[in-house]
Amino acid sequence: MIEFINKIPKAELHLHIEGTLEPKLMFELAKRNNIKLEYKSIEEIKEAYNFTNLQSFLDIYYSGAKVLITEQDFYDLTFEYLLRCKENSIIHTEIFFDPQTHTSRNIEFKTIINGITNALEDGKNELGISSKLIMCFLRHLSQEDAFKTLEQASKFKEKIIGIGLDSSEIGNPPSKFKEVYEEAKRLGFMLVAHAGEEGSYKFIIDALDILKVNRIDHGVQAFYNNELMQRLKEEQIALTVCPLSNTKLKVFENMKQHTIKQMLDFGLNVTVNSDDPAYFGGYLNDNFHAIYKNLDLSKEDIITLVKNSFNSSFISKELKKEYL
Ligand code: ADE
Ligand code: ZN
């Protein structure tokens, strides 16, 4: 089964490109850009990756992103992830990026997006991996800041398929971003949002009803509300679940406690994803291995999870047919 999991062609729908920054590349970029890191060695960095909740991770993750300065840095980060895709038999990936993490350090929007999209282009041509790019707003910042970011993105509209919402969930409800999501929808972007990761299941309902999202990122807190479970099943709303992320950030105590198999058995449209693999100890195949080993998944379950990802992706109907 492990061999089957490793080889089956997969899609990934929840992946933060800044979360693929491996300690080795972090050191290389720090050296290249003359930036002083708080860590002396790769081992010391890995020891710091001992998270207690989402915020404890985000603090370290934003600090690590400071080594990304030039277009080449964003290119190298992205191309390294695409090489991992190849190893994991990922043939299609939908990548999040967080422009505000960089524009707040005076990195130009075009530097970020050109570096990422040039690598995606080469990934398509050299590795045969198709991709889409989703721009996330940081929810700990204001809606006004999100509007500014949407404005900066307007010049690059053809390179961005959709809009997402990430960062600190508790205290930053979906309703805070109602108007900017309305504007993004009007401009023709697809819509997703992190909801029900460690925040209340009510944020999932609000992401659907107020932000009108096409997919929910995480969504695991839905398990604790029967009415919402029923709705997600009836409407077949895709949930981009990230098992290793959830255990590293203590959303579940351990993998045996994870509810993904129960959600799948209930008939929900769940998918498996790696979120921030350089920080959570594994890429997509590792996530599949972890749930397979701990939750008694069958071969059919694996196939359903993989099909759900292609079906819920933002690729054209024609390409879906080709992939499925
Ligand atoms: N940014 C990167 N990873 C995230 C996560 N798992 N939740 C919220 N924001 C994030
Ligand atoms: Zn995420």
Image (cartoon, rainbow, N blue to C red):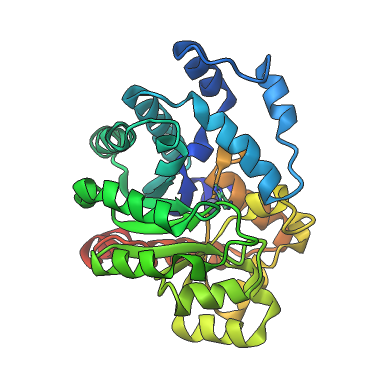
Residue drawn at the location 65% of the way across and 49% of the way down: 244
Occupied quadrant, residue 295 = bottom right
Quadrant of the snapshot with the C terminus:
bottom left
- Residue 224 at x, y percent in the picture: 70, 77
Res 9 seen here: no
Between residues 143 and 238, which one lies in front from this camera angle? 143
User: What number of labels is visible?
Assistant: 0
**Direction front: furthest residue:** 144
Res 284 seen here: yes
**Direction right: furthest residue:** 253
- Residue 260 at x, y percent in the picture: 64, 66
Residue drawn at the location 63% of the way across and 55% of the way down: 243
Image: 253 above or below 223 = above
- Residue 166 at x, y percent in the picture: 51, 54
Between residues 174 and 126, which one lies in front from this camera angle? 174
Relative to 233, 120 lies left or right: left
Between residues 146 and 51, which one lies in front from this camera angle? 146
- Residue 317 at x, y percent in the picture: 24, 67
Residue drawn at the location 67% of the way across and 61% of the way down: 198
Relative to 63, 10 lies left or right: left
Relative to 128, 140 lies left or right: right
Image: 264 above or below 302 = below
Relative to 217, 38 lies left or right: right
Between residues 16 and 266, which one lies in front from this camera angle? 16
